[in-house]
Amino acid sequence: MAALRENSGRKRDVMGLGLAALSRLAGSRTLERSGLREPVQNLVSAATRNGFKVAGAASRTFSSSRKRGGDATRPAPAEDKGLFDLTPSEDQQMIVETVSEFAAEQLRPAAGEADEKLSPPDGLLTRAAELGVTLISIPEELGGAGAERSVVTNALVAEALAHGDLGLAVAVLAPSAVSNALVLWGDAQQQADYLPEFVGENVPAAALALLESKPLFDPFKPATKARRTPGGYQLDGVKSLVPRAGQAELFVVSADLEGRGPALFLVESSTKGVSIEADPAMGLRGAATGKLHLEKVSLPAGALLGGGSPDVFTEAVRLSRLGWAALATGTAKAVLDYVIPYVNERTAFGEPISHRQAVAFSVADIAIELEGMRLVMLRAAARAEQGKPFAREVALARKLAADKGMRIGSAGVQLLGGHGFVKEHPVERWYRDLRAIGVLEGVVLL
């Protein structure tokens, strides 16, 4: 896929500006003379490690130049071919090849640094935006490149990006989760207000925030509350592991709407009561995850997405889980592609360790389980794309991705022996990232 835009601006969040200022202060000669260098350096270190709780990112103004009436624009269902065909179309093949090349040349080399610094390297996401990932699902009538629903294409893109690195793939795909939600469930005015930004030259950082920090979290029972007010709604709660939370300008947030159950709301980061706190985790560290605090956040009536329909929320959860299954497949494929040459080149007792039956069988198991994961995931994506029921298929895909993905990551570490335990090789990072598949909700949306 050809590059579709050039991003000339660079956003910097409040946390980044604060750390930059502190870093310059830490290097000041005045501090050396006053004896304050060490305390300030300690502050810089603590801020980097724990993060500040800051206001939402300085946000652009999301608004349409005119009120838009009529019906929202929706993508048409894909053609029902009658058969489950895994052969990608010519356009899909071109997109996958382009994204795979980008993942190999840009994401894979940057992943180690991003994992260490808890943030994507400067300029990486700008280059990723040039791929036009958000355009795939936006209909041509709204300025995008889609003619019909593209769940399978989105799955193939997610898989290709995760082959480079899962954490950075999440950072790249987070804005498209919001644009997809607007395309699928936004009304005409919401689409007019927000979608033009996702097809312009400066795609905003955005995130789908469903997860909360509680044991056995059920996305259908969020602790975040939404109550009606005379002018709209008020939200209170905390969302966890939100990708690029410090930079995000727009969130789609789940909350329990009194008397109606879980619903989705559009929340701009500049809204009073929105604040961000760093929330680094075991894996996905390159996605710069943070906590989204909502304290008496007042929203207009037009912030409710999909009319608060239970069916809309259920579909959002299913499409998100399908996205995680696609990401797991891409990372599991990365593990397989890495361990095969390793076991063939690594020698012990005068021969490659792949000649040992236990090693050969372990690699074969990875390949078998990977094929099963991928087949079920693509079948679920194909049914969703054609507008068919896909609840059973996505449940199977999520279960396989969570169980087999984690097992593949563990087997990759084991096959490398001591090398699997050190950061010199990326397998340990992939193992940590794959652990997220079974516990995360939201973030991505196919």
Image (cartoon, helix red, strand yellow):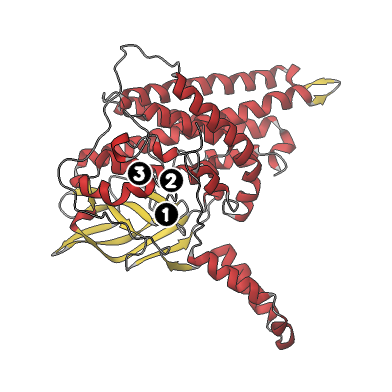
User: Residue 129, how many percent across, how many down?
Assistant: 49, 44
Under tag 2, what secondary structure?
A: helix
Closest to the camera, between mark 1 and mark 3, is 3
User: Residue 245, how many percent across, how many down?
Assistant: 45, 56
Mark 1: give few (<14), some (14-19) or many (20+) Cα within 10 Å. Answer: many
> Residue 28, located in which quarter of the rendered image?
bottom right
Q: Earlier in the sequence, mark 1 or mark 2?
A: 2
What residue is shown at x 43% (from left), y 63% (from top)? 57
Mark 3, residue position: 179
Under tag 3, what secondary structure?
A: helix
User: Residue 415, how many percent across, how many down?
Assistant: 68, 29
Closest to the camera, between mark 1 and mark 2, is 2
Decide: is 116 above or below 4: below
Give the residue type that dot 1 points to.
Ser
* Outermost residue toward the left in this view: 230
**Side of 340 where 131 appears, left or right:** left
Give the residue type that dot 3 points to.
Ser
**Side of 375 where 406 appears, left or right:** right
Under tag 1, what secondary structure?
A: strand
Q: Earlier in the sequence, mark 1 or mark 3?
A: 3
Considering the image in quadrants, where does the C terminus appear? top left
Give the residue type that dot 2 points to.
Ala
Asked whether the beta carbons under mark 1 and mark 2 sit within 8 Å of each other, the answer is: no
User: Residue 210, how many percent across, how many down?
Assistant: 35, 48
Front in this rendered view, residue 159 or 63? 63
Mark 1, residue position: 240
Question: Does residue 283 show up?
Answer: no
Q: Earlier in the sequence, mark 2 or mark 3?
A: 2
Q: CA distance from mark 1 to mark 2?
A: 14 Å
